[in-house]
Amino acid sequence: MKQFLILAILVVFLPGCTNGSAYRAYDGEVRSTMQIATLEGSQFLRQDWLNRYMDAVRFSRIDGNTIDDSVDYDRIEIEPGYHDVTVYFYWDMGTARGLAPALVSYAASQEELSRTLRFNARAGEVYRVMAEPHFDAERQDITTLSYVNFWVVDSNGNEVVSRADGSFTEPGQ
């Protein structure tokens, strides 16, 4: 777990680590970065004895609207104001692409692997959705992933959605 967290922290702070495109969650013409808020998903480097994988926080819904092909977007651009953003933990399957759509649907629908976060976005600000995966065993793979906690930080590292508000809670607790 310690090694996974160290790698995750390094990946989050590496500049230029976003490879995907932005999902524009507003109507009309493209706006400048000072007129919108940007929400990015954090990324996690995972390595086994042969391969390196890039797990990530992805977005499935914004204000009740489904984001089609959500794996293609590593950030969303939104208007300033209050938003409900549903995020999920995307487990990179590497070359096993045939499983990817099924896993995305599964992860996005599982309460323990996804969460809806509500926050007030300010124009010109960049926010990052952070994630902390929890595993049931020493071996950290999709079969031992128990749940994921999410929270949102602004560009200064201040929590906009707290760890407590984005934490997974067992039903009935």
Image (tube, rainbow, N blue to C red):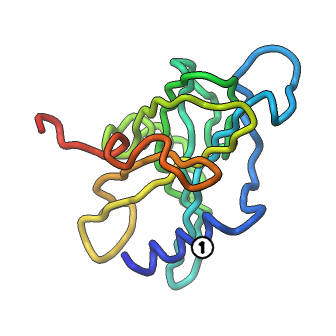
Indicate the position of residue 130 as horizontal and vertical percent values: 50, 53
In which quadrant is the C terminus drawn? top left
Write down the quadrant of residue 145 in the picture. bottom left
* Observer able to see residue 39: yes
Q: Is residue 125 left or right of residue 81?
A: right
As helix, strand or loop, the secondary structure at mark 1 comes to: helix
Residue at image point 73% right, 55% down: 18
In which quadrant is the N terminus drawn? bottom left
- Say how many tags the image has: 1
Residue at image point 58% right, 68% down: 53
Residue most extreme to the bottom: 49
Residue at image point 56% right, 55% down: 157
* Observer able to see residue 103: no
Residue 102 or residue 161, whichever sits in front: 161
Note whether 62 is above or below 126 in the view shown: above
* Residue under numbered circle 1: 10
Q: Is residue 32 left or right of residue 48?
A: right
Indicate the position of residue 115 as horizontal and vertical percent values: 40, 37
Note whether 133 is above or below 114 in the view shown: below
Residue 149 or residue 126, whichever sits in front: 126
Indicate the position of residue 137 as horizontal and vertical percent values: 25, 71
Residue 164 or residue 134, whichever sits in front: 164
Write down the quadrant of residue 75 in the picture. top right
Residue type, label 1: Leu
Residue 39 or residue 70, whichever sits in front: 39
Indicate the position of residue 20 as horizontal and vertical percent values: 74, 49
Q: Residues within 10 Å of mark 1 (few under 14, many from 20)?
A: few
Note whether 145 is above or below 125 in the view shown: below
Residue at image point 45% right, 47% down: 151
